[in-house]
Image: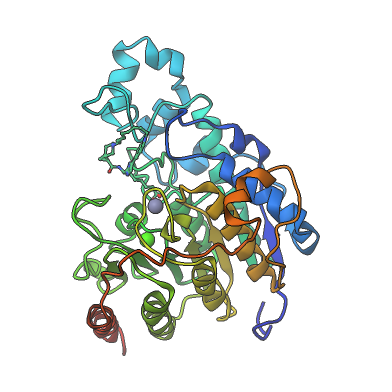
Amino acid sequence: SQSCPDGAKRRVCYYNDRLIAGVDYGEDHVMVPRRVDMAHALIRSYGLLGDMARLRTRPATDAEISRFHDGRYVGLLRNLTPEGFGAGGEVARRARGCNVGAVSTDGRSVDNPPVAGLWDYCQRYAGGSLAAARALASGEADVAVNWSGGMHHACRDRASGFCYVNDIVLAIDELLGHFRRVLYVDIDVHHGDGVETAFVESNRVMTVSFHQRTEGFFPERRGLLEHVGEGDGRHRAVNVPMKKGMDDDGYRRLFEPIMSKVMAVFQPEAIVMQCGGDSLSGDRLGHQNLSIDGHARCVGFMRSFNTPLLLLGGGGYTINHVAACWCYETAVAIGKEIDDNIPSHCYDDYYRSQGYKLRYPVDKSLKNDNTETYVTRTKCAVLRNLCELEA
Ligand code: ZL4
Ligand code: CA
Ligand code: ZN
């Protein structure tokens, strides 16, 4: 991994678990784990599996998950079944205390439902991220990929924002056993609050989140420019808040100078990147306007530093867009160009609305509230904070 020039191939390890695709958050819930299977089917149909080593792994153990999570919360998740929950009483009460199944005023819609097979699901996506971290630590891989991971909101003792177990914190913790400094970069449209909080006082982990910061957007009151980390971690939390309608150009004018500066001042030995697909144009929850090229350019940019790189999924609620994006980013990880025409495969029908092309057009009618002045000011403010880390 020391000296492969950019554009050159990388040794890529890839994790996929078919059982994750069957997890059901509820029929009208926006989180659809099947999108990971759709991405996998696309990756296979493009012939990319032959360019990667497949990670063989086991689900994460209770002990591994307990390295970050609270023992009582782990015990609750492990024993939670929709039946036990439905029976009401003690289990449901304890679960609600951990933000699982907390009911909103309409009496049914919840962010974190007590899904069937919940613990198995958590063990599998966390197992994938841990295996990916180990593949980087051992030097087996230059890039390791787990599109089912990236659950950045989960806290030590509670679920949040569709996330129950924080596989990112677990993977970073694993990397810290082998690397002195680990950089976390989060391009999901939401703020990476769970990861930032876990390492807010650490001088060995820098967290960087790019996100939509508008009135009422989840998670509220997080990800402000002035949140820069605390104690030993001061200036090692970086937040890049954006308005609605962010396009490829504006994003790039923030991402590249900020990440170049981060790499220069922090000098990480490993990078973990959360590639949430809800920052793409046309997402059901996000209001940004990135194209697949704009999103993948960020991945390509981080790859170009030749530092061990862990790629994770995250959000993404227009599932055909997300699957196309993660397939494209898998090709970027490998260093292979792929055709825009989607090969015929089992999930074909989902791509009809985008003319069976990988790259779908952005929303030309969406107003970009990120003025040139806003982008310049935000960039300068972030760079100024980062200067504080220079010796
Ligand atoms: C939904 O089930 O802001 C939309 C949106 C539609 C179907 C019909 C139910 C309608 C969740 C979201 C009512 C749903 C209202 N349907 C849910 C404060 C909230 C309390 C719950 O990408 N209501 C909470 C979480 C965010 C809130 C975003 C992003 C995760 C990630 C990484 C998490 N929660 C208001 C919303 C549903 C829907 C269910 C929804 N939830 C949109 N935004 C939220 O960063 C994976
Ligand atoms: Ca983010
Ligand atoms: Zn998100």
| Quarter-of-image position of residue 82 | top left
The total number of labels drawn is: 0
Q: Is residue 266 visible?
A: no
Camera-side residue of 254 and 234: 254
Is the residue 199 above or below the residue 347 in the image? below
Camera-side residue of 47 and 347: 347
Residue shown at the point (52%, 54%) measured from the top left:
313
Q: Is residue 101 visible?
A: yes
Horizontal side of 370 relative to 149 (left or right) equals left
Which color mode does the image show?
Answer: rainbow
Image location (x, y in percent) of residue 287: 34, 58
Is the residue 14 above or below the residue 240 in the image? above
Horizontal side of 103 relative to 171 (left or right) equals left
Residue shown at the point (51%, 24%) measured from the top left:
116
Image location (x, y in percent) of residue 317: 46, 47
Image location (x, y in percent) of residue 102: 28, 28
Residue shown at the point (46%, 27%) measured from the top left:
115
Camera-side residue of 254 and 157: 254
Is the residue 339 above or below the residue 120 in the image? below
| Outermost residue, bottom side | 391
Quarter of the figure with the C terminus: bottom left
Camera-side residue of 83 and 2: 83
Horizontal side of 179 relative to 331 (left or right) equals left
Quarter of the figure with the N terminus: bottom right
Image location (x, y in percent) of residue 261: 38, 84
Is the residue 247 above or below the residue 23 in the image? below
